[in-house]
Amino acid sequence: MKSLFCRFVEDRSGVTAIEYGLIAALIATLLISGATVLGEALNARMDGTATQLKDSM
């Protein structure tokens, strides 16, 4: 049992998988927040354009 625990503590492959998971989560968070900001900016621009078109008619 002791040797099994020592092997588990010394194994680094699990740490690598966790690091890759954290990197993927960070990238996903950045993509979602970027898409949200871009979507809000486009929405504001389209609302302004629609108002200008309505006012010009």
Image (tube, rainbow, N blue to C red):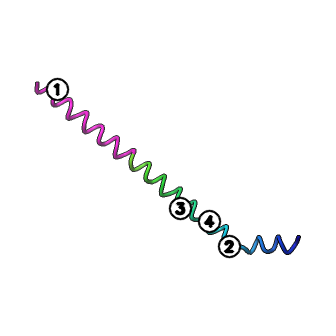
What amino acid does circle 1 point to? Lys
First in residue order: circle 4 vs circle 1: 4
Q: Secondary structure at mark 4?
A: helix
The local secondary structure at tag 1 comes to: helix
Q: Residue furthest right?
A: 1
- Asked if the stretch drawn in magenta spans residue 54, the answer is yes
Q: Quick one: label 2 or label 1, which is nearer the N terminus? A: 2
Q: Is residue 5 left or right of residue 38?
A: right
Compared with residue 16, is residue 53 higher up or lower down, i.e. above or below? above
**Which amino acid does the dot numbered 3 rest on?**
Ile
For residue 44: magenta? Answer: yes
How packed mark 2 is, by other alpha carbons closer than 10 Å (few <14, some 14-19, many 20 or more), is: few
Is there a contact, CB below 8 Å, between mark 3 and mark 4?
no
Element class at badge 3: helix
Which residue is the site of mark 1? 54
- Residue 32 is left or right of residue 13, and the answer is left
Q: Amino acid at mark 2?
A: Arg
As helix, strand or loop, the secondary structure at mark 2 comes to loop
Which callout, 3 or 1, points at the residue further toward the start of the chain? 3
Q: Nearer the viewer, mark 4 or mark 1?
A: 4
Image quadrant assignment for residue 14: bottom right
- Mark 4: amino acid: Ala
- Numbered mark located on residue 23 in the image: 3
C-beta proximity under 8 Å, tags 3 and 1: no
Quarter of the image that includes the C terminus: top left
Between marks 4 and 1, how big is the CA–CA gap?
Answer: 55 Å
The residue beneath circle 2 is 12
Name above or below for residue 30 compared with residue 16. Answer: above
Over which residues does the magenta segment extend? 36-57
Q: Earlier in the sequence, mark 4 or mark 2?
A: 2
State the residue position of label 4: 17
